[in-house]
Amino acid sequence: MMKVWREKRNRALSFFIAAVLTIAAVGIAPVQAKAKKQDVVVLYFSNTGTTKSVAEKIKKTTKGKLIEIQAKDPYTEEDLDWGDEDSRVVKEHESAASPAKSAVRPEIKNLGAIKKAVKNADVVYIGYPIWWGEAPHIMYTLVENINLKKKTVVPFCTSMSSGLGSSAKHLKQNAVISSKTKWLKGRNFYDGSTQKTVNKWVKSLND
């Protein structure tokens, strides 16, 4: 009788210990849902290569898709002569008080590919050089023709002296967005930047 009682007690004790260990394991290592990876697109317009350099660094950091905004009628060196009142950029600049109010909208050669990429993106970086304190007119062609509803939009720019200014604010006013669009403040990278600086900035956006 004593032997049978001991065997029953040992079996009960073993079951109890196993149950306790199972509960403890569940408490220590709960099942966590895997976070969804965000799809990132980095769009940029660049003539001298400065904005392109920053865009490439953002692409490297975010592992996103890099797309250049290509003008259907490319800007030549003569077009970019700020000192010539008959140059293309000067005429664009003088067409209205600001690019946002201008009727000048340079065509984008690869707009279809850009629309397709943006459609599937969660985060859209938009980069450009600063011209007269504003984004180039072609950037308005972009934001007025792509759907940024429900997207996180991150503007960035490059210049030798001017900051971001009101350029991103004016682009936002003309953009196709909704109340669910998260339009971040963005920043200017003075005459380019290092990979370390770009990495730090991108990380700060998620903090």
Image (tube, rainbow, N blue to C red):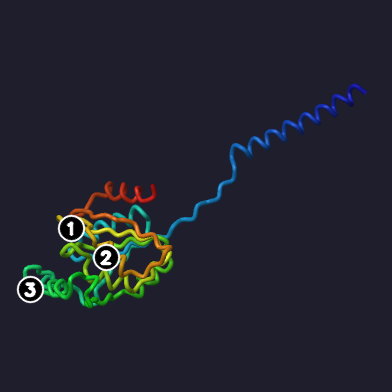
Mark 1, residues whose alpha carbon is within 10 Å: few (<14), some, or many (≥20)? some
Labelled disc at residue 170: 2
Which residue is the site of mark 1? 159
Q: Quarter-wise, where is residue 129 in the image?
A: bottom left
Number of disc labels: 3
| Residue for point 36% across, 51% down | 205
Mark 2, residues whose alpha carbon is within 10 Å: few (<14), some, or many (≥20)? some
| Residue for point 28% across, 62% down | 169
Judge from the rendering whether residue 134 lies leftward or rightward of residue 201; answer left or right. left
Give the percent coordinates (x, y) of residue 84. Answer: 6, 72
For mark 2, give the secondary structure: helix
Q: Mark 1 belongs to which amino acid?
A: Ser
For mark 1, give the secondary structure: strand
Which quadrant does the N terminus fall into? top right
Q: Mark 2 belongs to which amino acid?
A: His
Q: Mark 3 or 2 closer to N-term?
A: 3
Which residue is the site of mark 3? 85
Name the residue nearer the viewer: 150 or 202: 150
Q: Quarter-wise, where is residue 98 in the image?
A: bottom left
Judge from the rendering whether residue 195 lies leftward or rightward of residue 20; answer left or right. left
